[in-house]
Image (cartoon, rainbow, N blue to C red):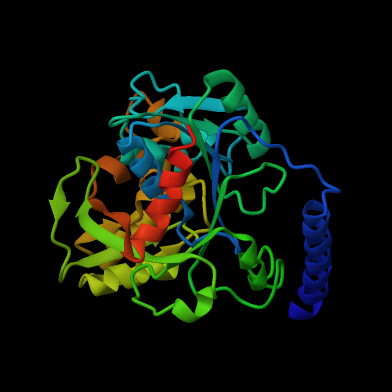
């Protein structure tokens, strides 16, 4: 496989090089908006912690009373139209679903509150068009672009790139890199995410302004937000996220005895056969509980087949009739937080 993919990876590297060069020299135009734009992105194909970091940034700005818009692509959506929802919206009429809105948007809806400020989520396949639409229609004070580092046609006032120490030498498709690691120097701020493993990543950062963060576990909860002590319990685990190894480490550190780990691709849309596989494995292993990620929970419970079903089905049974739990986590800055907040304050005073 490497014999085939490495030449393609080299070709991709050449394309990335010239694309960046054209932007650097003004041959490709960059669209600037009338409001400040913060981009949060990475160098690899997912799993570095962009979404929880966007939550952290959005929460900070909301607490300052700012009107923000979060722009994201909505991966694995069935349509490419622009959708808008306000933070705090309760989907009682079931207008939104994960097939048309994406799982990460539902994470923001669950984890963020309006607080002192006001927030909108704008989902669109073309993040530049979505940001321009949001800027023209809603006049936000600040726009935050989720996964925007490679989206260079949209100008930004603060460019944040997240690394996690797993960046490799090869670009897609031979590896997971979207562009070479040295391109981190294009960022205004580097965030080194140690996740749950406590890695020392200072040497990966270089001389660019930087912070180090990790994940803090709040508790394991179910759909009713009821907590459980998972220490010593056996569990059937499954997830469809960018970094399943981090999820495995979290379970291990909290004393969960995993009987089996069923892995799916990032942003996986679960079909009936997947649900049957999970439930059958749980029964076969006679596990105490089933554990998954919050991202998988929101994708499942906001899917059309759950929201629009008039009666119980296997999806609903897994969500509501089985002991299904997920870790509620948040990102925290463990080193150099003033560097981040000074940068955000500079953006905040511009509006």
Left or right? Give the position of 60 relative to 46. Answer: left
Left or right? Give the position of 174 relative to 191. Answer: right
Q: Residue at x 67, y 48 (%)?
A: 151
Q: Which residue is drawn at 34% across and 54% down?
A: 279
User: Nearest the camera: 241 or 204?
Assistant: 204
Q: Can I make out residue 314 in this image?
A: no
Left or right? Give the position of 131 relative to 106. Answer: right
User: Nearest the camera: 35 or 71?
Assistant: 35
Q: Relative to 265, is 60 above or below?
A: above
Q: Relative to 221, is 123 above or below?
A: above
User: Nearest the camera: 20 or 290?
Assistant: 20
Residue furthest to the right in view is: 27
Q: Relative to 155, is 218 above or below?
A: below
Return the x and y of residue 241 as percentages of the image width and height.
Answer: 47, 57
Left or right? Give the position of 204 relative to 63. Answer: right
Return the x and y of residue 70 as percentages of the image width and height.
Answer: 49, 37
* Number of numbered markers: 0
Return the x and y of residue 65 as percentages of the image width and height.
Answer: 34, 31
- The N terminus lies in which quarter of the figure? bottom right
Q: Can I make out residue 87 in this image?
A: yes
Return the x and y of residue 287 as percentages of the image width and height.
Answer: 23, 64
In the rendered image, which quarter is residue 58 located in? top left
Q: Which residue is drawn at 17% across and 67% down?
A: 233
């Amino acid at each position: 496989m490497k014999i085939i993919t490495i030449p393609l990876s080299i070709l991709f590297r050449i394309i990335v090089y010239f694309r960046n060069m054209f932007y650097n020299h003004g041959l490709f135009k960059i669209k600037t908006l009338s409001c400040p734009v913060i981009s949060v992105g990475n160098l690899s194909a997912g799993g570095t912690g962009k979404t929880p970091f966007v939550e952290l940034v959005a929460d900070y700005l909301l607490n300052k009373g700012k009107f923000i818009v979060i722009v994201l692509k909505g991966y694995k959506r069935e349509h490419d139209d622009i959708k808008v929802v306000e933070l705090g919206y309760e989907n009682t009429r079931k207008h939104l679903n994960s097939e048309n809105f994406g799982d990460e948007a539902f994470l923001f809806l669950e984890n963020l509150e309006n607080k002192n400020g006001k927030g909108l989520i704008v989902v669109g396949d073309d993040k530049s068009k979505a940001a321009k639409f949001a800027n023209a229609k809603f006049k936000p004070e600040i726009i935050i672009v989720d996964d925007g580092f490679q989206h260079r046609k949209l100008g930004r006032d603060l460019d944040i790139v997240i690394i996690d120490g797993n960046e490799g030498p090869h670009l897609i498709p031979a590896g997971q890199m979207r562009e070479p690691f040295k391109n981190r120097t294009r960022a205004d701020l580097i965030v080194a995410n140690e996740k749950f493993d406590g890695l020392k990543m200072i040497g990966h950062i270089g001389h660019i302004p930087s912070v180090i963060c990790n994940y803090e576990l709040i508790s394991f909860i179910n759909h009713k937000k009821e907590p459980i002590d998972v220490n010593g319990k056996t569990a059937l685990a499954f997830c469809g996220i960018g970094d399943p190894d981090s999820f495995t480490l979290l379970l291990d550190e909290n004393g969960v005895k995993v009987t089996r780990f069923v892995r799916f691709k990032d942003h996986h849309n679960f079909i009936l056969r997947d649900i049957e596989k999970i439930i059958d494995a749980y029964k076969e292993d006679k596990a105490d509980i089933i554990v998954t990620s919050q991202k998988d929970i929101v994708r499942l419970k906001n899917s059309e087949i759950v929201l629009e079903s008039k009666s119980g089905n296997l999806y609903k049974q897994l969500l509501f009739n089985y002991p299904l739990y997920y870790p509620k986590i948040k990102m925290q800055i463990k080193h150099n937080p003033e560097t981040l907040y000074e940068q955000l304050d500079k953006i905040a005073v511009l509006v």
